[in-house]
Image (cartoon, rainbow, N blue to C red):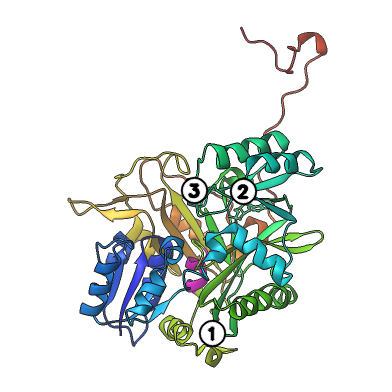
Amino acid sequence: MNLLVIGKGGREHALVWKLRQSPRAGKVFCAPGNAGTAAEGATNVAIDHTETDKLNRFCAREQIGLVVIGPEDPLAAGLADYLRDKGFRVFGPSKEAARIEGSKVFAKELMRHADVPTADFQVFDHPGPARTYVETRDYPVVVKADGLAAGKGVVVCKDNTEAMQAVRRIMTEEEFGRTAGRKIVIEKKLDGEELSVLALVSGRTILPLPACQDHKAVNDGDKGPNTGGMGAYCPAPAATPKLMAEFERDVFVPVVHAMKRARYPFQGVLYAGMMLTNQGSRVLEFNARFGDPETQPVLMRLKTDLLDLLEAVADERLHEFENKVEWDPRPAVCVVLCSGGYPGKYDNGKEITGVAEADALPGVKVFHAGTKTDDKGRVVTDGGRVLGVTALGSDLAAAKARAYEAVKLIRFAGMHYRTDIADKALKVKPVAAPVEPPKLPAKFRRPGGDKPATS
Ligand code: AMP
Ligand code: GLY
């Protein structure tokens, strides 16, 4: 069966890599793909997901038996519906169902309706009432742009001033785009450990995958701005069997059933971003797709044929796999290597070396994300998140050690990464916060600050 994977990230390289292991996989294409998908033996196709007509003709010409859509943008734009209408088999939710990720308002109202535990919230379509709401809260809030904003439309605020600024940036200045900022959700800020809980969903069948933990902040110790994800490990020991059963009962079942009843059934991967608070688990967000980088360690551990699984989802036969999916018992750790400056501005085109040596280590797989082959045939950086170095180990500590051993072999100018992926599960203390300078006696303090004047 010929296959087409849509996307160009680490997630898509992992999907291509795993799909190609299926004895039933014929030619595998990736649109647009990266240097890693090409090296994997897939054919990269220079068609953008918005060029739907071209994709349709491509699928017809290459007799594509299954299209797997990786990222959220094509799902939110309705690519799955379009290709299904043309008669192709697609893994991924419809445009209506993908609103669970594409619209924070939709997701929160669905959760309220289905009685799914989530942070208290209110929806606003004007900045005035939003500001009044912020002023009357006696707890810190999170302000979320309704629409997709390349993962940047969520502002976790430490106080009211920041929340007011967030309302202005999203609604008045339309920093995340006009549509994304038309409505906002303001919700209570929660504290706790985060888990990524993904499940294959088709019809009434929900098949949870082993839970992962992502690392969103750019620096060690969860410091610095949020990114798309700096690394992940799987399984996350925090997701005990009891918690997983709770997630299924209190989150996945009510949501999947509510969507089915409302006539926009979900088909694909439903990803619940959970926070384990002192008051119990709460959903922070839903995604309508595989996580990135979560997919890399998850698929490293999957033993069952991925093509069989994805096809069963698309055909609504997923129940055939209940209690039958096989996993490598070894945990996997993925460390993401980024371009200098990411998640801010960065330059592309830096030559990458050492990937083959890293890949040759036992239990290691280097997944490409922002990479391409330049006109001299060199593999160069082409994005913020460049590589996802993923390793299996006899236990989490061994997987982490092996992943970092591989990382040490790879080089490109400006490369940076976190050194503490999986430490939370290993109960390693976070790096100590920088020591505060001692407070100076009052006579040396400047009005409004306690640092001495330097000039
Ligand atoms: P979202 O796009 O909704 O997942 O938000 C991105 C990130 O923002 C999450 O992974 C959390 O780290 C953080 N976040 C979202 N909602 C909340 C909340 N209610 N309380 C604390 N952090 C949150
Ligand atoms: N790793 C977070 C995401 O895929 O959204």
Counting from the top left corner in percent of width and height, residue 415 is at 42, 44
Q: Earlier in the sequence, mark 2 or mark 1?
A: 2
Q: Which residues are magenta?
A: 294-300
Amino acid type shown at disc 3:
Tyr
- 81 to the left or right of 453: left
Q: Position of residue 165 (x, y in %)?
A: 63, 35
| Mark 3 and mark 1: Cα distance apart in space | 31 Å
Q: Residues within 10 Å of mark 2 (few under 14, many from 20)?
A: some
Q: Secondary structure at mark 2?
A: loop
Q: Position of residue 2 (x, y in %)?
A: 29, 81
Secondary element under disc 1, as helix, strand or loop, is loop
Res 286 seen here: yes
Question: Between disc 3 and disc 1, whose residue precedes?
Answer: 1
The residue wearing badge 1 is: 326
- Give the distance between the C-alpha atoms of the residues marked 2 and 3, in whole angstroms: 39 Å
Q: Is residue 280 left or right of residue 260?
A: right
Is residue 253 highlighted in magenta?
Answer: no
Magenta stretch: dominant secondary structure: helix
- Image quadrant for the C terminus? top right
Mark 1, Cα crowd under 10 Å, few <14 / some 14-19 / many 20+, is few
- Residue that numbered label 2 is attached to: 125
Residue 417 is marked as 3
Q: Secondary structure at mark 3?
A: loop
Mark 2 vs mark 3: in front: 2
Q: Amino acid at mark 1?
A: Glu
CA gap, disc 2 to disc 1? 47 Å
